Amino acid sequence: MLEMQRIFTTQKKYMLFLLAACALGWGLTPYSTIFAGIALGSLFGLYNFWILTRRMEKFDRVLKEGNGRAGLGTAMRFASGVAAVALAMTFSSYFHLIATVVGLMIPYVLLVVERIIFHAKKHD
């Protein structure tokens, strides 16, 4: 599971750059609600990825020990996504709804891209 922690650390670095870009876009462009929505969704997406990382470690531990039952926290991640969308809908003058949904998916897109790059480098 050290690999999963490394991936999560890399995700945090990428998200800091994305949030910095969103802050610049929010302050310097007329599309402040879109950049705020992407930032909100990305934060909740990173939180979901953190939950997934923790649950995968617990799942691995339970499988190695052979006792108990562990899930991957799907309900918790779904509730977090609903909370992000609810915030965007409640404060629609500050957050763009579609941008928030796109932001929720950014950590997973970054994960796929990072894995493709990793495997491309490994096979060269």
Image (tube, rainbow, N blue to C red):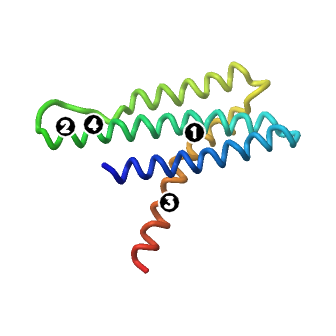
Report the disc number at residue 75: none
The answer to which image quadrant residue 85 occupies is top right
Quick one: SS at disc 2?
Answer: helix
Please tell me whether residue 14 is drawn above or below residue 52 in the rendered image. below
Sequence-wise, the earlier of marks 4 and 1 is 4
Picture quadrant where residue 62 is located:
top left
Location of residue 92 in the rendering, given as x and y in whole percent from the top left corner: 74, 24
Structural distance between the alpha carbons of marks 1 and 2: 29 Å
Residue at 42% of width from left, 27% of height from top?
Answer: 76
Q: CA distance from mark 4 to mark 1?
A: 23 Å
Q: Earlier in the sequence, mark 1 or mark 3?
A: 1
The residue singled out by tag 2 in the image is 62
Question: Who comes first in sequence, dot 1 or dot 2?
Answer: 2
Mark 2 Cα within 10 Å, few/some/many (few <14, many 20+)? some
Q: Is residue 102 above or below residue 67?
A: below
Q: Earlier in the sequence, mark 4 or mark 3?
A: 4
Give the Cα distance between marks 4 and 3. 23 Å
* Left or right of residue 12: residue 71: left
Residue type for callout 4:
Lys
From the image, tell me which residue sits under label 1: 104
Residue situated in front as seen by the camera: 103 or 5: 5
Q: Are marks 4 and 2 in contact (CB under 8 Å)?
A: yes
Q: Is residue 96 above or below residue 116?
A: above
Using residue 12 as the reference point, say whether residue 102 is left or right of it: right
Mark seen at residue 114? 3
Residue 68 in the image: state x and y as whole percent: 15, 30
Q: Residues within 10 Å of mark 3 (few under 14, many from 20)?
A: some
How far separated are the C-alphas under marks 4 and 2? Answer: 6 Å
Disc number lying in front (1 or 3)? 3
Q: Earlier in the sequence, mark 3 or mark 2?
A: 2
Residue position marked by numbered label 4 in the rendering: 58
Q: Residue at x 36, y 32 (%)?
A: 73
